[in-house]
Amino acid sequence: MSWVGATETAEAVVAARKPYKLVSRDFHPEDSVIRVGDIAFGSSKVVIMSGPCAVESRDQVMESAAFMQHIGVPVLRGGAYKPRTSPYSFQGMAVEGLKILAEARERYGVLIVTEAVDHESLANVAEWADIVQIGARNMQNFELLKAVGQCGKPVLLKRGLAATIDEWLMAAEYVAAHGNLNIILCERGIRTYETKTRNTLDISAVPVVKQLSHLPVVIDPSHAAGQWQWVAPLARAGVAAGADGLIIEAHPNPAEALSDGPQSLNFRHLEELMKEAGQIAQAVGRTL
Ligand SMILES: [Mn+2]
């Protein structure tokens, strides 16, 4: 057997072992560009998404949306359904929260990304939001992933906190196999033996996933860090590593946030981070 033949055989063996198809680069060699409104994930522009962890009130959302518009953040985040570790923590405003987010879109021209936690909330989120988020804890909720495949909206699929890259891509494959290839992958930190940070941001996931898959990858430095002081350095690293976007928690008054206050940036720090991320993007041949 020639060396060329041996290499081809080895590649065929590796390809056969790859459990995902639709989300694989083998299936679609070019980068996928996911268009939402007038923005695109996976283009030369790095997409910034920001806003509070949770929708807490109409005033809080309007203040946040106005600031995002002011500094040029095109996508507002904010959870109306909150899968909290404790059943005694704030659980979210549900449909009322979704309506507030939709009103913010009308008034300030921002797109909305928000999480669905089950079939019922998925129907509501798909109706009111622009991007459906599937959180880390639901990454392997396969029945929900099948429904997301048919929901008609782009999906932001977070990596599970104990999921390997292959498991994460298999979760994306579920969504794709059920009809939705508008998938944005989101690395948000994985659980390791380190306890100083809330999770360990797996920066290597960006180049690895980009080699394995054609889908865009964004970084969530907030849930990885768990502390606002570490969010900007991780965000900068994400852009430098080639991430197609960032999703960052920011709150008008982090000290009073009902959810994830310690890791939320105030608006002044978010504005500083936008400038820094813009410079890093330029250094790697991209823009914000
Ligand atoms: Mn949060």
Image: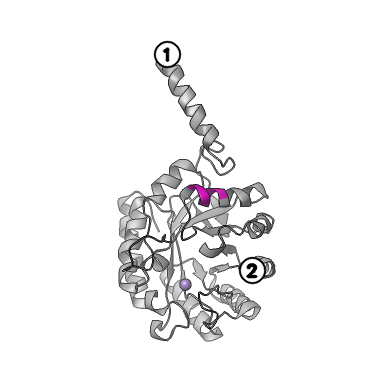
Q: Can you say whether 91 is above or below 125 in the image? A: below
Q: Earlier in the sequence, mark 1 or mark 2?
A: 1
Quarter occupied by residue 47: bottom left
Identify the residue at horizontal 58%, vertical 58% (top origin): 155
93, 107: nearer the viewer: 93
Q: Secondary structure at mark 1?
A: loop
Local crowd at mark 2 within 10 Å, few (<14), some, or many (≥20)?
A: many
Identify the residue at horizontal 48%, vertical 58% (top origin): 186
What span is colored magenta in the figure? 166-170
Identify the residue at horizontal 62%, vertical 48% (top origin): 176
Q: Picture coordinates of residue 130 (x, y %)? A: 60, 64
Asked whether residue 7 is drawn in magenta, I would say: no
Give left or right: position of 278 versus 13.
left
| Colouring scheme, one of rainbow, by chain, secondary structure, one colour | one colour
- Which mark's residue is nearer the viewer, 1 or 2? 1
Q: Quadrant of the C terminus?
A: bottom left
Identify residue type, mark 2. Val
Please identify the dominant SS of the magenta region: helix
Identify residue type, mark 1. Ser
Q: Is residue 45 visible?
A: yes
> How far apart are labels 1 and 2 at the CA level?
55 Å
Q: Picture coordinates of residue 71 (x, y %)? A: 41, 71
Q: Secondary structure at mark 2?
A: helix
Quarter occupied by residue 238: bottom left
Q: Picture coordinates of residue 226 (x, y %)? A: 37, 71
Q: Is residue 135 visible?
A: no
Mark 1 lies on residue: 2
Give left or right: position of 180 versus 200.
right
Mark 2 lies on residue: 125
Question: Does the closest atom of ligand 1 sit within 8 Å of the Cβ of label 2?
Answer: no
Asked whether residue 167 is drawn in magenta, I would say: yes
237, 281: nearer the viewer: 237
